[in-house]
Image: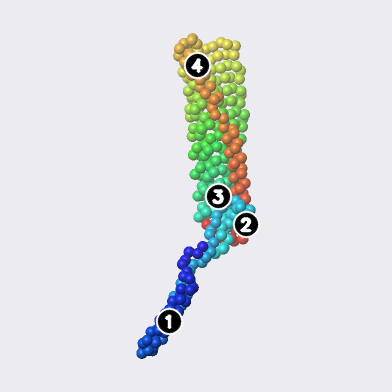
Amino acid sequence: MDCGFSPPLYLPISSFLLLSFLLFYLNQVFSTLNTFLIPAAGLAAVSSLFAFFRLLKLRPSRRVLPVVWSIGNDASGSDSNRGVSGSGTRIAREDVVFYGNGDVYEGELRKGRCSGSGVYKFYGKGIYEGDWVDGRYEGYGIESWARGSRYRGQYRLGLRHGFGAYRFYSGDCYAGEWVGGQSHGNGVQSCSDGSYYAGEFKCGVKHGFGRYCFRNGDTYSGEYFGDKINGFGVYKFANGHCYEGSWHEGRRQGFGTYTFRHGEKRSGEWDNGILKCSLVPSDPAIERSVEAARKAAENATLLPQVEDQVRKTVSAANKAATAARVAAIRAIQNHKKGKFCDI
C-alpha cells in the first residue's frame, strides 16, 4: 500500500526552467548584477533537485507483509499454523515448554501461555489432552491419571463444567452435568458392584430427586439430601416388600406404611427404622405421608435424561484430544529443529 505523497516529476523541472528564464531576463536588464545572479541561479537549481530527491527518499515501502494467525488449513489447503513476520521469517506456533516441577507442555502457545490445542504432562501423575485458553482448560478435553481414572468432557476456566463422564480407577463412573469441577445437576452414577443411581446431584453428592438400584435388587425412588435418603420416597425390596413414607438419613422416620408381599400392612409413626406407634392406614397423617412418598417417586422417574448430551460431549472430547496430540507432534518437531516460536 502506498501511504506517502510523491510530487510529479515535471514540477521540479518546470520550476527550474521558469527560474532560469527569469534569471536570464533579469541578467539582460540588470547586467551589473550578472556576477551575483549566475551563482544564485545555480544554487536555486541545486536546492530544487536536492528537495526532490529528499521527497523520494521519504516515501514508505509499497508492500508490508502482515502477521497472519489461524487454526487448521487455509483456503489454499496449506498448513496455516505458522505465522509470517514482517521480514518474511516463518514463525512456529507450537513449541515445547518445560516446567521446574517436571511438568511438560507440548502444543500451541500464544503470548507465552497455553492456548489452542495441546498436551500437558503432569510429572508422575497424569496427562491432559485438549483445548486451552490463556493457560487453562477451556472447551473439550480428556484428563487421564496414573492410577487409571479418566474424565472426558467439557471444561470452563480450568474446571470440569458442562457435560462429561468420569470413570474412577475403582470402576465406578459418573456421567452427567458438572459445575465448578463437581457433579452438579442431572446425572447417572454407576458402581462396580452393579448398583447405580440416576437423579439429581449437588456439589458432588446425591441431592434432590433420584432413583437408586441396589446390587441386591432393592430400589428406592424419592428424595435425597446430602448423599443420603432423606425426605419422602418409596423403597421396594427384592423380596416384594415395600415401604412408602418419610425418611431421615437413610432410615424410616416419621409417618409411613410398610406393606408385605402377601398384602399385610403396618402403618404408623417410625423412629430410627422401628415402628413405635401403630396407626390405621386410613389415618390422615399416614395418607398424607404415603401420597407425598408416591409423588416424590414419580418426580424421580420424570427427571431429564442426559445420556445423549453426555455421548455427544464425549465424542467432542475425543476429537479435541486428537487435535491436541497432533499439535504436540508439531511442537516436538519445531523444538528439535530450533524454530522460533511466538511465546
Q: Which numbered disc flags the more N-terminal residue, 3 or 1?
A: 1
Query: Residue 116's mark?
Result: 3
Residue found farthest to the right: 77
Q: Which numbered disc flags the more N-terminal residue, 4 or 3?
A: 3
Cα–Cα span, label 2 and label 1 = 72 Å
Q: Nearer the viewer, mark 4 or mark 3?
A: 3
Q: Which numbered disc flags the more N-terminal residue, 4 or 2?
A: 4
Q: Nearer the viewer, mark 4 or mark 2?
A: 2
Amino acid type assigned to the residue bearing label 2 in the image: Gln
Q: Between residue 341 and residue 86, name the one nearer to us.
A: 86
Residue on which disc 2 sits: 333
State the image coordinates of residue 333 (x, y, percent, origin top left).
Answer: 62, 57
- Against 317, residue 50 (above or below) is below
Query: Residue 290's mark?
Result: 4
Cα–Cα span, label 4 and label 2 = 68 Å
Q: Nearer the viewer, mark 3 or mark 2?
A: 3
Q: Secondary structure at mark 3?
A: strand
Q: Is residue 276 visible?
A: no
Cα–Cα span, label 3 and label 1 = 71 Å
Q: Within the image, what quadrant is residue 141 found in?
A: top right
Cα–Cα span, label 4 and label 3 = 55 Å
Q: Residue at x 59, y 61 (%)?
A: 338
Residue on which disc 1 sits: 21
Q: Nearer the viewer, mark 3 or mark 1?
A: 1
Number of numbered callouts drawn: 4
State the image coordinates of residue 110 (x, y, percent, origin top left).
Answer: 52, 54
